[in-house]
Structure formats: C-alpha cells, structure tokens
Amino acid sequence: MSELIANLDALAALALPDGGWGYSPDQGAHLEPTCLALLALAREPERYKPTLDGGQAFLRKCAVGDGTYRIERGREEAVWPTSLVLFTLASLGAPADELKRTAAVLLGLQGRHTADDKDKEVHDIDLTIVGWPWADGNFSWAEPTAWACVALRRAGFGEHGRVADGIKLLVDRALDEGGINYGNRRVLGRILEPIPGPTALMLLAVQGKVEHPRVDSAVAYLGDQALAGDDLEHLGWAKLALDVYADRPGVADKLKQIDGRIEAARKARAETPYVRPAPLRVALAALALHTDRGNPFRLVDDKTQTVALAPTKRVIRTLSLGQRLKGVFNNLAVTAVGQLRPAQPEAHVHIAPVDDYNADLADVVQRQYEDFRERVPLKGKRVVLKPNLVEYHRDKVINTDPRVVAAVIELCQREGAAEVIVAEGPGHWRNVEYLVGASGLGDVLRTYNVPFVDLNHDEPVKTVNLGRLTKLDHLYLSRTIASADVVISLPKLKTHHWAVATLSLKNLFGTLPGICYGWPKNELHWRGIDNSIVDIALTRTPDLAVVDGIIGMEGDGPLNGTPKPVGVLVMGSDLVAVDATCCRLMRLDPERVAYLALGAHKKLGLLAEPQIKQLGDTVAQRAQEFETVEHFRVLALGKPA
C-alpha cells in the first residue's frame, strides 16, 4: 500500500494548478496524459479528490457541443482523444447521459473509404472494413480503432455493430507472427514490424470477444517483448494487457517478472539526463504495477446499456462570412508572399569525403561550416537538430548515425550556441524515447549533456501554411521547431518507395506533432507527399542541412532497403540544392523528384545544376548508381508502378 501511495503521490505532484496533466511539465494540459493519470489516481479517490476533481474539470472544459473532446489550442480535426475521455469518464462513473452523447458521436466517426486499386495491390489487409481514424477524414488505423472499441465496451455499447467491425479490423491487421502496428501487415510484399503499444491496445480491445491464432500470437509476442525490453512505456502497456490474459499458459509467470522490469525501467529513466518528467509514463507505471488493486482495462460486462443508441455525426465547425472573407484575404496574402520570395542566384553545397563513421566527423563538419557561418550563424542561438529516426533495427541503416548527430552537436557548442536540442517526431513509432535509447542516440545526448524533445507530443503551434499545396490553411508545428532560432535537418541518404528519395526536406514530416496528425501521419501522405513536404518547408524553412551519406540506403527505403556506402557528408543552407545534389550522387534525376521540382517552382531553393556551386568533392567523384524501389515493385507485384 505504501508503494502505491508513493507512486500516486508522484503523479499527483505533476498535476497542473488549473487541473490536468501535460505530456511534459512545461506544457498545458492534454487529454491523453490526463485520462491515464485520472485512471491511476482513482484507486484512492478520497486521498486525491481535489486532484481528481481538477482533472475531470479539465476534461469537461474540453467538451465540444457535438460530444467530442479536444483541447482548444489543438487541431480541431484530431478527434482520437474522444475515445480516451469516454473510457475514463465511464470508468469514473460519469452520468449515463454524458456517456451516451459521447458514445453516439464516437459511433458516428469512421475512417474514410478507399477505392484505390493501387492500395489494394500494395497491401494485404481488407480495406473494406471500417474502423476509426486519428482525425476527421482520415483512414482507419489500429490504435484509434482499439481505443474506440475499448471505450464503447466500457461505456456499455460493446454489442454495437461498429464495435464488431472494429474488432474484425484489428484481427485482420494483426500479424500471423504476432503483434500489430498502426495498420499495415505488408507493403510491397514485405512483412512490417509489430509494435508493443498498439499490440497491447489491440489485445485489450478484443478481450473476450474473439478466439483467433493471431490473438494467441500477439499475447506471446507482447510477453517476449516485455521480458526482453527496458522501456517504461512498452512495459506499462504490456503489463496492463497481459494481466487480462493471465489465464493463458505462461503469462502469469511473465507478469511477475514484468513488475521488476517496470521498477528497473522507472529508476533508469529517472537517472536519464536527456528526458523530461513524463506524467503519461508515471501514470502507466502506477496503473501497471498495481493491477492487484484493479485493472480498469479489464472489461467484464459489455451489456450494461439496454437502450439502443443511434450514431450521430460529428459537427464540423462552419466559418462565418467574415471568417471566409478573412480566409480569402489570407490566401491572397500568402500567394503574394510566395511571389515576392526572393530567388537566390546561386546556392553552395559542400560534399566532404568521409569513408568511416569513426573518422573525426566534428572536424569534417567544422571545415564544411566555414562556408556557411555568415549565412547561418550559430553563436548565441537556440539550435534544434532534427535527425531522421524512423525505426530501429540493429542490422539496418535506417536512421541518421548517432556519430553524425554528435559531430553537429559539437559544432554548435564550439560555435557558442546558447542552447542545443535534439528533437524528432517519427511517424512509424509513437514511442520515440525507446528509439533514442535503442539506436545509440541516447548515449550521444548523455555525453554532450543535450536534451531530447519528442516532437510528436510537443505543444502544437497553429501556423499559417505558406505553401497551400495541401489546401490546408494552417499547419500545426511543434513548439520546439516553431520557436527555434536555427533548425538543422540531419537526414540519411536514402531512396524512398513513394517519394523516390528521402533527404533533408522529406525529413521535415517529423516536425509536425503526431497528436495533431496521427501515426503514421497518413493524412499528409494522402494530401500528397510532395505537397506536404513543400508546404512544411515553406512554412518553417530549415536553416541548414547535413546529410549522412557515409553509408546510405538503396532500394526499398526508407526501411527495407540495403546499405550503400557512399562515403560523404553533404552540407548546405539551400535544402532544395542539397537534396538535388544528393540525388545526383545517387544518379537520380532531381527533376523527376516531384517535391524538388515543386520546391524550385515555389522559390524554396535552386534545382538546376549550373546554379549550384559545388564545394569540396564533386558529384562526379562520388556518384554511384542507386537501385530505386522500381526494382522491388516488379519483384513484389510482378509489374512496374
């Protein structure tokens, strides 16, 4: 009991004075960490009554008239937290009428249909099953579908047909080998990797509803991952899900071991200098360690509601005449700004030969930077480094090598930067803290005493979209990026199965918070990858790029390609010119890379080779033929794209 109180006291201490919890202590309240914190503190309702009252008051302050929940400063379309609020309010005994209103609108939310034959060829999932999206108008994804099913079951509507469809979707998208990711089993014939968090939520959603070999495989996968891992978030979700399946062979023994691993992970995180306190992780640990006091995710009875509930549609805010006129004026102003954007007569790009990651990379980038110091001064600046950290596999060269990040950190510190931050918001994994530690980047941050910011859960900043190619009037940037004096893009030199090449501009997808756009930020894809890249870059143009081309990736990038030693670091302040140069190093025609051609047209940067002054080595000295995904499409589909 004393251990439980100590854990809950620590969580209560992180509550904000006005009620609720943020993803980090320097944020305003957000719905997800607040919901998990309330579920944990509800184990001792009398002791924490004022804190519980404050958290519930925050939830109700976020209630929208149509029954959904969202924070006022967030993106209106991001409706996924509504499920979490419904689950939490139902668990805390909220009035039936309040639950019915939210359940009705949740039942009315659904992922958009796809009739794209190309998608049907590329994927092996049933695209006709409709679940729940992260945001209005998006497709169905595993995690928001799992949360919706769990919430509706907790609120007493588990027999509704939509819940049955949601469970069907989750089983369809689960891997035969065990686990689930955000939605796809295979792409272009390649099996994708499962992820512990979505797997735990999937198991919670389908508990007691379906018997299937994929459920059994998911239980086995999650148990193995928990015993092999040391990430607090993964362990917390694994314990909560496996507790529900404790009667399965071998699970009870694993549960006893997981508690010890959670304690060790919590202690290790407290001693990790580059992360900030995380109320969500504290709440997860408190919930997971004390399932003997109850597990709110154990769904006992689906049939508490006897009244049939008809779904209601979400009411999208309509603009007044004045707001529409203001929008027209803003569009004209943005167009004028684009037309007046000055075109530079010449861009400089530096190619430095580096054959080994163990070379003195800091000295290399220092020499490169001499050509860019006047244009991009670092002294006294708040500098944010944005590496490419997508997924981690020990035997793949997916991410920017940590030693390249270390070299740029050292450059910034030598130049007298006031503050250096490393930040990333990957679309493939929500739990970027795990990736930081597993990839070796955490060791670099510890050595140089540099903090890390998870951009996916950073405070969103509503910003006028200066590109408008996606037809979005605003983009929600992460506060860390929006407030930086200098942003440096640190990508990996890779081919990409949709965008042809993923370099310093494509790397910008990670600057938009997942809490606004979901995972894998699919909305930005279906609005056009090329359109989205250019919109983001025009709205917050990075100041410098350093491309890790010491070992690149060819073929089915950004995840499943093969290593390709090129032996270069490429630096420049014009990111179109940098990426065009990198394409030429891969013997790809940059004119055929749509976002580069589009960026050049919108005066984002220079594309033509005669306008790019090469410094250091020449393209001709270092260029190598790269295989693109066309080769792999033929293997997977039997025909070219």
Image (tube, rainbow, N blue to C red):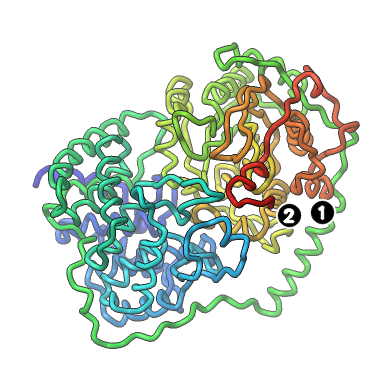
Q: Position of residue 172 (x, y in %)?
A: 40, 62
Identify the secondary structure beneath mark 1. helix
Query: Does 193 appear above or below 260?
Result: below
Task: Look at the image and tell me whether residue 538 can be seen.
Answer: yes
Name the amino acid type tagged 1.
Answer: Val
The residue pinned by badge 1 equals: 337
Q: Position of residue 2 (x, y in %)?
A: 10, 44
Query: Does 268 appear above or below 73?
Result: above
Discs 2, 1 touching: Cβ within 8 Å: yes
Residue 466 tag number: 2
User: Between residues 413 and 50, which one lies in front from this camera angle?
Assistant: 413
Gap in angstroms between the C-alphas marked 2 and 1: 8 Å
Q: Position of residue 354 (x, y in %)?
A: 65, 16
Q: Residue at x 57, y 34 (%)?
A: 387
User: Between residues 476 and 206, which one lies in front from this camera angle?
Assistant: 206
Q: Residue at x 70, y 42 (%)?
A: 541
Q: Residue at x 68, y 57 (%)?
A: 528
